[in-house]
Image (spheres, rainbow, N blue to C red):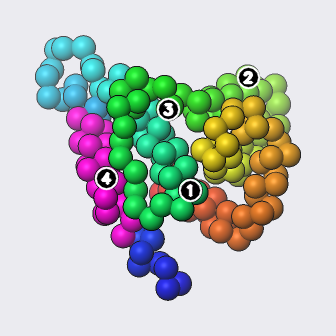
Amino acid sequence: LEHLPWLLSYPLRGFALPVLLMVTVFVTVGMRSSLFVPGLPDTGIPLLLITATWTVYYLMRVIRHSARGHAMPPSMSGDAVFMSGGLKPLLMPALLVGAYFSLRMQQPQLAQALLLLGFVVLPAYLFVLATEEDLWRALHPLNLLRTVFLMGLPYWLAVALLAAGVLA
């Protein structure tokens, strides 16, 4: 508990605050773009997709940076513009959503169980992908189970926070 104030102030230090403000502005503009210019095509969806990719890219940099022992948040590098690092982390969620929609009519219980399992292992997937930078290792079920087991209670707290964010 003595580290809690430091953890809560992490988004306000270094490069994290400007990145957080940029994401907030882009999401706000993306959500309201059709309201600003009636009659023009909606540009909000592409802006939201680009912002989501950049956010995932920065999340991976934060995990990798913190795992290497750095206390301050990393900068948002120019690689984010090319979205090279933001697409790999979206593969597992895309596979899960695709599997869910293909199974939901014929096997609704299996589809829901798969979605729940994917939701539980998503933080492990992101952690393994960020630290090892290998997509196949991040998708391997034994690596995911090992990560969940080794992280223990903090992992389940992260899953609970993710669930609270989804349900809110």
For the residues labelled 2 and 3, say whether their Cβ atoms are less than 8 Å apart.
no
Local SS, label 1: loop
- For disc 3, the marked residue is 86
- As shown in the figure, which amino acid type bears the numbered disc 3? Gly
Residue that appears at 54% across and 62% down: 69
- As shown in the figure, which amino acid type bears the numbered disc 4? Phe
The numbered disc on residue 102 is 2
Give 106 or 71, whichever is nearer the viewer.
71
Image quadrant where residue 12 sits: bottom left
Tag nearer the camera, 2 or 4: 4
Task: From this view, report whether residue 9 is shown above or below residue 66.
Answer: below
- As shown in the figure, which amino acid type bears the numbered disc 2? Ser
Image quadrant where residue 9 sits: bottom left
Q: Which residues are magenta?
A: 9-29
Tell me residue 17's x, y (percent): 29, 55
| CA gap, disc 2 and disc 3 | 25 Å
Residue that appears at 41% across and 78% down: 5
* Residue 23 located within the stretch drawn in magenta: yes
Q: Main secondary structure of the magenta part?
A: helix
Residue 141, visible in the rendered structure = yes
| CA gap, disc 2 and disc 1 | 39 Å
| CA gap, disc 4 and disc 3 | 18 Å
Local SS, label 4: loop
- For disc 4, the marked residue is 15
- For disc 1, the marked residue is 68
Residue that appears at 48% across and 45% down: 61
- As shown in the figure, which amino acid type bears the numbered disc 1? Arg
For the residues labelled 2 and 4, say whether their Cβ atoms are less than 8 Å apart.
no
Q: Along the polypeptide, which appears first: circle 1 or circle 4?
A: 4
